[in-house]
Amino acid sequence: MIARIPRPLRLIALLVVVVAFGMAHLATGSTVSAAETWAAVFGHADRLTTQIVHDLRMPRVLVGAGSGMCLGMAGIVLQTVLRNPLASPDVTGVGSGAVLGAVVATLVGGDFASPTRMILVAVVGGALGGGALWLVAVRAGSDPLRLVVIGVVVSAALGGGTTMLLTARPQLTGAMTQWLIGSLNGRTWAHWSALWPWLLVVSASGLLVSMTIQVLAVDDDHGRAVGLAVTPWRSAVLLIAVLMTAVAIASVGAMSFVGLLAPHAARALFGADHRFTLPAAGLLGAATVCGADVVAQAVTSWVADPARAGVPTGAVTALIGAVVLIRVARRTPTAGGKP
């Protein structure tokens, strides 16, 4: 049924769904009702309600959606270029490296802890993690499950470095927990101002090289046959994925498995044409983060004290993503051809 609908119409319909998710996200909260939220959006609410919606909820929704877009697109780029359906920022070392960079920036403090500088430091950390996986993979081969194991090892090593930093400054552990789990709590317009220019750059870059990604998805021989400089282009595309991941993590922390969920859903809806699958993965990533945050806020109202601490959004995405990862791993063939 879905296959009969032209891909451009499917993409437009998906955009409408994502906007609906964002609107539902904006209306979620314990202090202001949905009706009061819409009144504030259109300028018909009192000053306090307008301030809550404009200064607290709107940046939370925008930062969540923008970060989800980055993670969704990063996931599909990594899976395609590495030819590995299990690849995602979480299991390639890119995410752990970016988290390490964000934690270092937080520890240094000052200008480095600002949202803008945080992104730059996270990019360096993400490049460190992704580069380590790339170097090891060149020697060890490209079997999908082997790459995942290598990625987990790289991620564990970088995670160990992060843990050492946390134990060295235990008084900052609470403030830095968000980088390890992923949370939208406390997101402000400053975070959105730092995020959106990068979001535009990495999104445009990904779309511009979507056909190159399509070629890299086949094999190296095919790429060379059509005149593509495979190694430089693969490195460039992986750098785009690193930027996407670092931008997201510097904004919301390690939002686990969004980069795994969104690409598989995008392929199910749009097939293997990356002109549509790439933006679809971004939109689905945005919807995933917004939806997960709605669930996190609902759970917070049931089991936690909203005045003290909320359930992290990353905890919800991790629970969902773990199930998806197991299912994908069971269906992924090994080098011997058996799942």
Image (tube, rainbow, N blue to C red):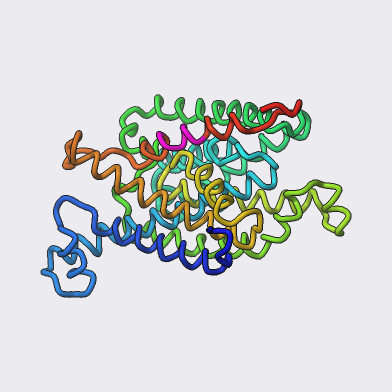
Asked if residue 298 lies in the magenta stretch, the reply is: no
User: Looking at this view, is 50 or 88 the one in front?
Assistant: 88
Instruction: Specify whether 134 is left or right of 327.
Output: right
Identify the residue at image location x=32%, y=59%. 59
User: Looking at this view, is 107 or 59 the one in front?
Assistant: 59
Most extreme residue toward the bottom, as rendered?
43
Instruction: Specify whether 316 is left or right of 146.
Output: left
Tally of marks: 0
Most extreme residue toward the right, as rendered?
225
| Residue 83 image position (x, y, % from top left) | 70, 42
Identify the residue at image location x=58%, y=59%. 3
| Residue 7 image position (x, y, % from top left) | 58, 65
Identify the residue at image location x=40%, y=24%. 167
Q: Quadrant of residue 308?
A: top left
Would residue 61 be seen by someone viewing this image from the given angle?
Answer: yes
User: Looking at this view, is 143 or 127 the one in front?
Assistant: 143
Vertical comparison of 322 with 212: above or below: above
Main secondary-structure element of the magenta-colored stretch: helix
Identify the residue at image location x=40%, y=34%. 319
Instruction: Specify whether 166 is left or right of 122.
Output: left
Vertical comparison of 317 with 42: above or below: above
Would residue 180 be seen by someone viewing this image from the given angle?
Answer: no
| Residue 315 image position (x, y, % from top left) | 37, 36
Q: Quadrant of residue 309?
A: top left
Q: Quadrant of the C terminus?
A: top right
Most extreme residue toward the front, as rendered?
1
| Residue 17 image position (x, y, % from top left) | 40, 61
Magenta-colored span? 319-324
